[in-house]
Image: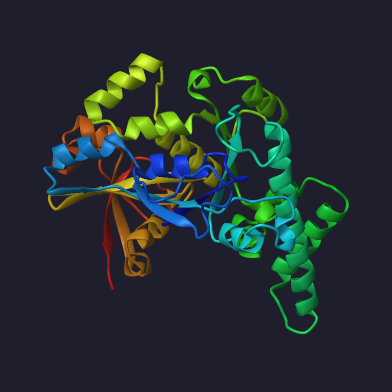
């Protein structure tokens, strides 16, 4: 499945710098003035997974294929974006197309980098963005409910829109809808306020290990569960180094994991995703699926015919596959199972599908 995360925030908070670091490119213009990014930049990144290399060695695979994640660098937002201020309308339309939102928050002081506000205040900055998205949702809901009087729309979607309107008008937390409606229906509603969110506190280099007063005030307000403290500048520096230099540099500054890995882990967690593998002589490949996917649904990620004609899934857990040295010994030692249509795929499963078209 194609996973797409949009990087959003006020102008000059480090969105393009982070995008370039994550995608190991200079595709996004990073400049010291507002709206240097106009059209969104898109970068597709291989999801790192050490298990792939281990499986490929065991299966003697000719190639390795990682699953991927797309990052979208979206134009900076300003107060009034929902009414078209700055690049507001473009900004909001681009957000609708992503699966998850990465909120880039300025948590550093600098006289060299312009700030659209007179002070650094990460809590205020996020509230500006959230307010603009809520106002955009409000306008969208009202238009769609008005259209419903003329054209029939799915009743379940109408129920979501009406409940969301009630939350907005009465200043209730709109996220309560996530406990009341199916995730697929919520996605179909297209509401920005319901998009899964990751908060990235962009700090200066000296604050990357323990954060600073700005990042701490943000975490005190919004919590740590979906928040990362990252220095976009350091991430950029890391990606300019070769593998050995990168390891030494990260060890020197006390950085245990690169920002890309941390972001992907957060994205998988908030979107409820996991990975299964196919492994053989031709290739070892990772596939991204929703947690609690059945074996036929997992097969459908490879090809719709696999799901339609699903018969059985030859299944071995990652640990068993490695400890038994591949398919043959796993089967001989009773570690390979034949699973049917009701089997819930587990993270790390190695699967071989039997199907009939």
Query: In x, y percent, where is residue 242?
Result: 23, 31
Colouring style: rainbow
Q: Is residue 272 visible?
A: yes
Q: Is residue 68 above or below residue 198?
A: below
- Residue at the bottom extreme? 150
Looking at the image, which residue sits at the far right? Answer: 170
In this rendered view, identify the residue nearer to me: 328 or 241.
241
Task: Tell me what residue is drawn at x 22 percent, y 33 percent.
Answer: 322
* Image x and y of residue 50, in percent: 28, 34
> Left of 65 or right of it: where is 73?
right
Does residue 185 sit above or below 17 in this rendering? Answer: below
- Image quarter of the N terminus: bottom left
Query: What is the number of callouts on the image?
Result: 0
Q: Quadrant of residue 342?
A: bottom left
Horizontal side, residue 272 vs residue 314: left or right: right
Q: Nearer the viewer, residue 336 or 5?
A: 5
**Residue 136 seen in the figure:** no
């Amino acid at each position: 499945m194609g996973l797409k995360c949009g990087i959003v925030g006020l102008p000059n908070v480090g969105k393009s710098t982070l995008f370039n670091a994550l995608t190991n490119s200079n595709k996004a213009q990073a400049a010291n003035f507002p709206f240097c990014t106009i059209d969104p930049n898109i970068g597709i990144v291989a999801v790192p997974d050490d298990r792939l290399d281990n499986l490929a060695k065991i299966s003697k695979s000719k190639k390795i294929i990682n699953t991927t994640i797309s990052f979208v660098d979206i134009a900076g937002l300003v107060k009034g974006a929902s009414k078209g201020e700055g690049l507001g309308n473009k900004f909001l339309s681009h957000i609708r197309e992503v699966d998850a939102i990465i909120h880039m928050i300025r948590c550093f002081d600098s006289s060299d980098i312009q700030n659209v506000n007179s002070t650094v205040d990460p809590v205020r900055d996020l509230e500006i963005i959230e307010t603009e998205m809520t106002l955009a949702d409000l306008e969208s809901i009202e238009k769609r409910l008005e259209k419903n009087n003329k054209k029939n729309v799915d009743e379940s979607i109408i129920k979501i829109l009406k409940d969301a309107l009630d939350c907005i008008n009465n200043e209730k937390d709109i996220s309560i809808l996530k406990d009341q409606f199916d995730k697929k229906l919520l996605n179909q509603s297209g509401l920005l306020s319901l998009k899964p969110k990751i908060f990235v506190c962009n700090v200066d280099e000296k604050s990357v290990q323990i954060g600073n007063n700005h990042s701490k005030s943000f975490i005190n307000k919004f919590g740590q569960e979906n928040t990362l403290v990252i220095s976009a500048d350091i991430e950029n520096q890391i990606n300019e180094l070769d593998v050995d230099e990168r390891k030494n540099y990260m060890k020197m500054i006390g950085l245990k994991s690169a920002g890309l890995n941390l972001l992907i882990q957060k994205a998988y967690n908030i979107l409820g995703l996991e990975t299964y593998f196919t492994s053989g002589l031709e290739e070892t490949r990772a596939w991204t699926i929703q947690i609690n996917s059945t074996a036929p649904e997992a097969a459908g990620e490879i090809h719709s015919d696999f799901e339609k004609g699903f018969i059985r899934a030859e299944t071995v857990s990652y640990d068993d596959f490695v400890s038994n040295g591949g398919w043959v010994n796993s089967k001989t030692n009773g570690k390979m199972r034949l699973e049917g249509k009701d089997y819930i795929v587990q993270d790390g499963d190695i699967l071989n599908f039997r199907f009939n078209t």
